[in-house]
Image (cartoon, rainbow, N blue to C red):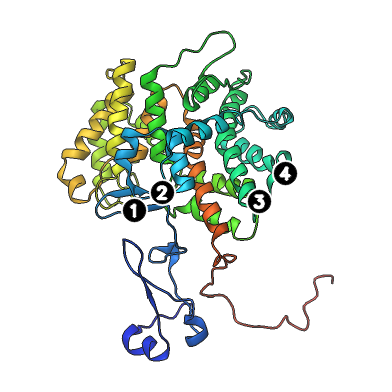
């Protein structure tokens, strides 16, 4: 049984030790508790890390109250409007937006690394055809270190840079292969003449029977989606990548750990859950019943894709995704499609109903991304893999930042033990009799 008592921080802890306060360039100050146990014999207790900064970082900043998301100081709204995904990749990895010559070199390097080792295709044959694409992706990405072990010295910046390039370049190819394998269609090799997103769309949605003609509206929409998913500070999967990396594990193993974490329904599976919810509702006429269920605190049903743990205001990504969503639906002439009419009516209600407004249950990025993916012809079991493709660069940026940090050490959280105290095995205990 856990014993609970109150403790005055000012009166008790400060009399025992000094707790330095650290300030970042913006955001809340933090209390450095590294010396707390040594000086007081106490740990902090913070399930879910709701009040704990696990590291320092220069990559991404979120102000959930104000609805702000910055990559390296740049507002997500400006990046989504003015930059390509690969420009954002360069920014996250290097700290600055690329010059024209830097971008040409970076994009060219990514392009020539999009192929995967031919023997890697044999891995797919070991999976059942009906295996979930995320299960396949975990296995195949984890195997990359067996094929690209020539640059695995994590202490070498050059090796870290090579690994980053390879992952950003090859993960889209692997994602497309996961889809093709599950549908029984042949793998599509990348083509160097195409852009990053065009290449992926061709590998994902094209077949050898037809020439693939990329639609610029859809290409730009997917490019923007990848930008919006590229990083999101110390979320569960990024924290997992950092924790795995703190042990000295190779980058492919660390990214695989992030992919596995992202697979969880509470993290990367939310956009798939949105689509399943829309299918459950079925028709616009059923919406009032489901809205009533969502408002009933005794009913376990909840609207997927609304609200966010970090954002207590509008998710800045959702507004951009909403614009993208409407662009795609207009381009494909799908506004009259029953599923999309459902989604748009739910969106209208959430933006106008006082219940949702008071509780700040606004549509979030997952609500719109699932709709866009479905409109593009991407099956729902691939949604989380698409998320992983966009987030790979964020994971790699955080991993590289952590490895280069001279103060980094292996992650080792402590615990509040509530189990049995020391006891002896009974003298007459003998399982062999």
Residue at image position (68%, 52%) is 153
N-terminal of the pair, mark 3 or mark 4, is: 4
Q: Is residue 133 visible?
A: no
From the image, state whether disc 4 or disc 1 is nearer to you: 4
Furthest residue in direction bottom, as rendered: 15
The residue tagged 3 is: 250
Cβ atoms under marks 1 and 2 closer than 8 Å: yes
- Contact, CB < 8 Å: mark 3 with mark 2? no
Name the residue: 73% across, 42% down: 146
Q: Dot 1: within a 10 Å radius of its alpha carbon, few (fewer than 14), some, or many (20 or more) residues?
A: some
Disc 1 marks which residue? 62
What kind of element bears circle 4?
helix
Q: CA distance from mark 4 to mark 2?
A: 29 Å
Residue marked by disc 2: 232
Secondary structure of the residue carrying numbered label 1: strand
Residue linked to disc 4? 149
Q: Which mark is residue 156?
A: none
Q: CA distance from mark 3 to mark 1?
A: 28 Å
Task: Tell me the distance, in whole angstroms, between the alpha carbons under discs 4 and 1.
Answer: 35 Å
Give the SS element for disc 2. Answer: loop
Distance (Cα) linking label 1 and label 2 = 8 Å
Q: Secondary structure at mark 3?
A: loop
Q: CA distance from mark 3 to mark 4?
A: 9 Å
């Amino acid at each position: 049984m856990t014993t609970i008592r109150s403790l005055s921080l000012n009166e008790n802890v400060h009399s025992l030790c000094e707790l330095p306060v650290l300030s970042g360039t913006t955001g809340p100050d933090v209390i450095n508790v590294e010396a707390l146990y040594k000086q007081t014999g106490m740990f902090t207790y913070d399930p879910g890390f709701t009040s704990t900064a696990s590291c320092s970082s220069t990559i991404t900043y979120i102000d959930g109250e104000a609805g702000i998301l910055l990559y390296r100081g740049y507002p997500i709204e400006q990046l989504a409007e003015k930059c390509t995904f690969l420009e954002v990749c360069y920014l996250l990895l290097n700290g600055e937006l690329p010059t024209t010559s830097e971008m040409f070199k970076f994009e060219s390097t990514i392009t020539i690394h999009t192929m995967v080792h031919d023997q890697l295709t044999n891995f797919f044959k070991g999976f059942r055809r009906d295996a979930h694409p995320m299960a396949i992706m975990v296995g195949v990405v984890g195997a990359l270190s067996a094929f690209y072990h020539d640059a695995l010295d994590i202490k070498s910046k050059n090796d870290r840079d090579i690994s980053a390039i390879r992952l950003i370049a090859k993960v889209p190819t692997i994602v497309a292969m996961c889809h093709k394998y599950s549908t029984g269609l042949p793998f599509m090799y990348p083509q160097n003449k195409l852009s990053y997103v065009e290449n992926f769309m061709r590998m994902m949605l094209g077949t050898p029977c037809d020439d693939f003609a990329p639609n610029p509206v859809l290409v730009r929409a997917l490019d923007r989606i990848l930008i919006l998913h590229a990083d999101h500070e110390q979320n569960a999967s990024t924290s997992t990548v950092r924790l795995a990396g703190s042990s000295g594990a190779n980058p492919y193993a660390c990214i695989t750990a992030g992919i596995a974490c992202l697979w969880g329904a509470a993290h990367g599976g939310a956009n798939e859950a949105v689509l399943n919810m829309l299918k459950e509702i079925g028709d616009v006429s059923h919406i009032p019943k489901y809205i009533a269920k969502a408002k009933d605190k005794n009913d376990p049903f909840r609207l997927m894709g609304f609200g966010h743990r970090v954002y207590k205001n509008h998710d800045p990504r959702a507004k951009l995704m909403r614009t993208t969503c409407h662009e795609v639906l207009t381009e494909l002439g799908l506004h009259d499609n029953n599923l999309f009419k459902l989604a748009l009516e739910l969106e209208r209600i959430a933006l106008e109903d006082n219940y949702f407004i008071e509780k700040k249950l606004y549509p979030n990025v997952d609500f719109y991304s699932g709709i866009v993916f479905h409109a593009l012809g991407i099956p729902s079991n691939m949604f989380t893999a698409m998320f992983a493709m966009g987030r790979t660069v964020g994971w790699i940026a955080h991993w590289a930042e952590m490895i280069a940090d001279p103060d980094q050490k292996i992650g080792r959280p402590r615990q509040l033990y509530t189990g049995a105290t020391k006891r002896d095995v009974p003298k007459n205990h003998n399982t062999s009799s």
